[in-house]
Image (tube, helix red, strand yellow):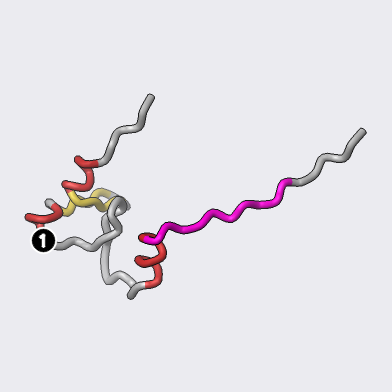
Amino acid sequence: MKPIKEKACRRFRKSAKTRRVTQGKPSSGPVCRLCLQEPGDPEKLGEFLQKDNLSVHYFCLVSIRPPLL
């Protein structure tokens, strides 16, 4: 009987956008969970919506693609 080899733990790379946001200055308040930007110009990003622990821009929310079933 052959011993089962343990798989090496894969390290996932962070996207350039995630690295840029995490390396930048710490946020002073809530950020959009979809685009990782702070609330800004409502005409550009839409109204900033917050509920419980979730914060998103309106335009980010309506522009996401629904999951394929």
Task: Name the residue at 15% across, 62% down.
Answer: 40
Amino acid on which the number 1 mark rests in the picture = Asp
The front one of 13 and 54 is 13
Q: Report which residue position mark 1 lands on.
A: 41
Task: Name the residue at 80% across, 44% down.
Answer: 5
Classified by dominant secondary structure, the portion drawn in magenta counts as loop
Q: Is residue 59 magenta?
A: no
Q: Which residue is most to the left?
A: 43
- Where is residue 39, by image quadrant? bottom left
Q: Is residue 10 left or right of residue 33?
A: right
The front one of 13 and 37 is 13
The front one of 69 and 56 is 69
Residue 1 position in % (x across, y down): 92, 33
- Where is residue 42, by image quadrant? bottom left
Q: Which residues are magenta?
A: 7-16
68, above or below 41, in the image: above
Q: Is residue 9 left or right of residue 54?
A: right
